[in-house]
Amino acid sequence: MGLLRLLLLALLVSGRVGAGGAETIGNSSQGFLEFSVGKFRYFQLNKPFPQEAILHHISSNVTFLIFQIHSQYQNTTVSYSRTVRPGTSGTGSDKGLVSILRPEQSVCTWYLESVDAKPVQSVAIPLSYSERDPIPGGCNLEFDLDIDPNIYLEYNFFETTIKFAPANLGYARDAPPLPCDAGTGQEFRWRLQYDVYQYFLPENDLTEDVLLQHLQKMAQVAQVKANAVKVVTLTANDKTSVSFSSLPGQGVIYNVIVWDPLLNTSAAYVPAHTYACRFEASEGSCASLGRVSTKVFFTLFALLGLFICFFGHRFWKTELFFIGFIFMGFFFYILITRLTLLKYDVRLILTAAVGSVGGASLVAIWWRFGALGLCVLCAGLVLGFLVSAAAFFTPLGNLKVFRDDGVFWVTFSCIAIFIPVVFLGCLRILNILTCGVVGSYSVVLAVDSYMYTSLAYITLNVLRRALNTDFRRAFTNVPSQTNDTKRKRATAFPASPVQVVEARERAPNNEHSGSQLPHPSFERKALWQINPDQRPLPEGAACRREDTPASVEGCGLGQGSSALEFMPTCNPNVVQLGMILWCP
């Protein structure tokens, strides 16, 4: 009998446990999700099984709620009712609804469903606000919802644009809503201000869990201010639209905080995120950015640039080809992109061909005419271009004055020209810096074709500005993260000290390292016999002309000169520009 009683007791216990488990599964299958104010909840949505989100025990001092749901890239729908209708629901990866509470209302319900056939991992949160807080999207006249707290995001290769509806002042539960356009005084919505924030996800991290985790830092006002960067502040008279530079493969979260300066209260819109790419695209998806043609082009370009980085000052003609390739290729790509409708791969092949012609032409100019000043000037302008692009890569480039194309390009050109002018008296240093900086940066461009790196946008932003007139309005912020810091250390003038030491070792008798280019690579053999005495000297010059190797060494041009190599022997204050010799 004792054993029988134990068996009956065990059956009863197992029955209760089974009933409890069935109740839990039953609630899940019926689609009930209970929420608490200010707390995130993870769940999975399936298309055949819509979910009902319920919030109980709403405080009496709460006048409106914002319920928001987020997923990585699959669309979800949030609605006021079970039947989805236009004007009462929103569909997307970042959507939310504003619920204006009635007097004595303590329970609120929303309905969630998935548009995609695949299960969608989502996170949602309800946020509460009082009657003193402004209502995000309360004066919507553009989008479908009557009160629309959402941020609408569009992107292309050049820019990412966010749009949102203007807010309205808050009001009590039993009070009518304030008119949006009744007046422009301080007692109406025109006193509201909008702070636009930007938050970057970890570099090269496309995982769903990371996104949903970081979205929690961009939902509430205090967290947004603590974690994100404020980009711009808009007034009620400004257009509620802001553009940013697109960063394909880099996750970015945007949000807007509307602030009432009179009551010192704030409310947050529903944050929106983008990777500026498509996860399910057959070509150029987020997981495999960059075309094959781009990778081949920049890999070969980086190999040549790496050689120039360490040995360009010695192999002068190779450096000239590299500089000429950059000059001609850059301007030609802008020209054919703006004037033709050719496909990207065709444009890239033509750019490589024309760039090679440009490099060969610069080498031919040096070989035929020995125009040292022209050649070094081209190298200095490439360095100046990179320095100018880096200057506008800083917050300087986001100043409102530079949104005017005339101001931008004049300032950009002045900075680019200023660099070779500064180094006019020390051409060797200019040439060595050009080799080290430009050569190492070509490696950064190659890395960007395989994985995201912010440093590539130093020059890419300038190219976008030249190709697209609308890009002038975009803010060009980029993340400064660990991987980019390592690349900065690895590519910041890595070869310049090496080439300086090499140049000095190859010219041990040179006591002056200022204005001359005392490197054997800059020696030019005469293509025809020239009588040095027939060449006019500037007035006041104190030089003696000699054709002997000894005299060439006296000018600090190294050893190995032949009788056909000529260069004057001057005092240490020699400034050599091409075939013009100024010896004060």
Image (spheres, rainbow, N blue to C red):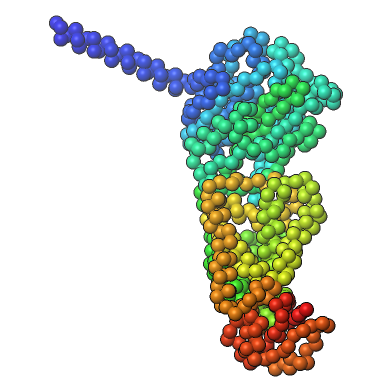
Give the left or right position of residue 487, taking residue 90 as reference.
Answer: left
Give the left or right position of residue 266, taking residue 31 as reference.
Answer: right
Depth check, front residue: 312 or 531 = 531
**In the depicted structure, whether residue 232 falls above or below residue 291:** above
Give the left or right position of residue 73, taking residue 536 as reference.
Answer: left
Residue 71 location, x and y as percent?
54, 34
Q: Residue at x 73, y 65 (%)?
A: 422
Depth check, front residue: 382 or 550 = 550
Q: Number of callouts in the render?
A: 0
Q: Is residue 418 visible?
A: yes
Q: Is residue 330 visible?
A: no
Q: Residue at x 85, y 26 (%)?
A: 184
Residue 224 location, x and y as percent?
62, 31
Residue 92 location, x and y as percent?
60, 34
Q: Quadrant of the N terminus?
A: top left
Residue 303 location, x and y as percent?
53, 67
Depth check, front residue: 544 or 387 = 544
Task: Give the image quarter of residue 556.
Answer: bottom right
Q: Residue at x 32, y 15 (%)?
A: 17
**In the depicted structure, whether residue 431 falls above or below residue 67:** below
Q: Quadrant of the C terminus?
A: bottom right
Q: Residue at x 48, y 28 (%)?
A: 43
